[in-house]
Image (spheres, rainbow, N blue to C red):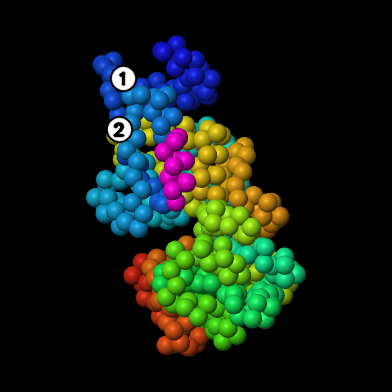
Amino acid sequence: MKMKTFSKVLAVPLTMVLLTACGNGDNANGDSENVTLSLYLTLTEETAVNAVEEVIDEFEDEYPHISIDANFPADAYEDSIRVRMASNDLPDLFDTHGWAKNRYGDYVADLSDMEWVENFDESMEPLLKDEDGKVYAFPLNQANDGIMYNATMLEELGIDLPETVDEWIEAMETIRDETDNDVSPLWIPGNDPYAIGQILDQFSTPLLVTDEDNNYEEELLDGTFDWSNYTLLPETMMEIKEKDLMNVDALTASPSQRAQLMAQNLIGFTFADGAFGRDVYELNPDIQVGTMPMPAFYEGDEPSWIGGERHTMAASNNSENLEEAKLFIEFMARPDNARKVAEGTTLPAGINGVDADNYYAEYYEKWSHIDIQPYFDRVYLPGGMWDVYATTGSDLIAESITPEQVSEIMEAEYHRLRRENNEDDEEEAN
């Protein structure tokens, strides 16, 4: 048994051998020690959790002195990690879920000396590596968020994929007219206000960033942005509602209904996570779900994917088992293991050299020429604006506020939160 394990170790890179030797449970006196690593991830989908647990089982077989205590706390994840971060007691391994640099940067170990780093996907490297070379986390996958659509329905109705917001609205009008209003051209599960916030956040990028003549990056970052330029987005949402292109129960519908309704051919477009297409296929293999990048707001601009960092694995720089934690990350980065997790999450892998076969592979290939833009709020808005997106979006659809009032509230909260986060003081100092 020992000979078998030894031969496997010889087959891996030298740094891993060194890590294995360091983390092999031998202390300075040569005594054997067992180690348990705490792991917290934001994964919730069963297939994704199963994929990670499968890799953990294989790791524990190969390194029997190391156990992984895996936790998937779902909605309680962020609060749990915030509490542990405040007491400098983060898990040995944890998911930075989009905040590797800005929130967790001072708490994570530098992974730049690890073998997998040379395989960084070019779209992920700027998000997880800084100008000094520090690598903040290993990307389990990468997000390509856009709009999900009923590919079967669009083909039957002869609808070309829209590349602008105007074309998208025209496509939804065709669905409304050709199906006698039996289908929701756009279906929103608004009993989760963050679902509405997600839509507004994704559309903020083509509205305010990607078009050369409507680029407000500098103003958004230095606090001088004129929020009347945002009003076009809530106006567009109201146009969609007033044209009966949105489900009538948009404020009360639950995300749990989404796959079932799509499988019944009752949805044209919606916003959903990576597992959606696979869930629909399991309910009705005759319905094909496609994914497309966010359409451009302005003529002449290109569509854009929204995304970057989705699920990651970082090591706490305060961990007493840092070497073992890095050993597990290196194991996770092996191509076969990275492939399992990427396919389990139905997203592209975060490193090169991983041939993941997932539900949307043909769509990612079709739109491979489209740039991935970072999530708007993570770059341009102060922390806390996600809640404002959600509440203003819900109030707008409820018609309790106007599009102009949405912009006024966004502006007021943007400045309040910048002051709370001391971002205005930093700009003045600069």
Q: Is 117 in the magenta? A: no
Q: Residue 22, image x and y in percent?
A: 37, 23
- Crowding near the residue tagged with mark 1, few <14, some 14–19, many ≥20 C-alpha atoms within 10 Å: some
Crowdedness of circle 2 by 10 Å Cα count: few (<14), some, many (20+)? some
User: Looking at the image, which residue sits at the far left?
Assistant: 87
Q: Nearer the viewer, residue 348 or 187?
A: 187
Q: Is residue 384 left or right of residue 281?
A: left
**Which amino acid type is shown beneath numbered disc 2?**
Thr
Outermost residue, top side? 3
Which is closer to the viewer, label 2 or label 1?
2
In the image, what residue occupies the spot 36% across and 24% down?
64
Q: What span is in magenta? A: 45-55
Q: Residue at x 41, y 38 (%)?
A: 53
Residue named by callout 1: 26
Q: Quadrant of the N terminus?
A: top left
**Residue indicated by mark 2:** 36
Distance Cα–Cα, label 2 vs label 1: 14 Å
Residue 81: x, y in percent? Answer: 31, 52
Kind of residue at disc 1: Asp
Q: Could you tell whether 359 is left or right of 366 in the image? A: left
Q: Secondary structure at mark 2?
A: strand
Q: Residue 24: horizontal and vertical position, in percent?
A: 36, 22
Residue at 55% across / 78% down in the picture? 246
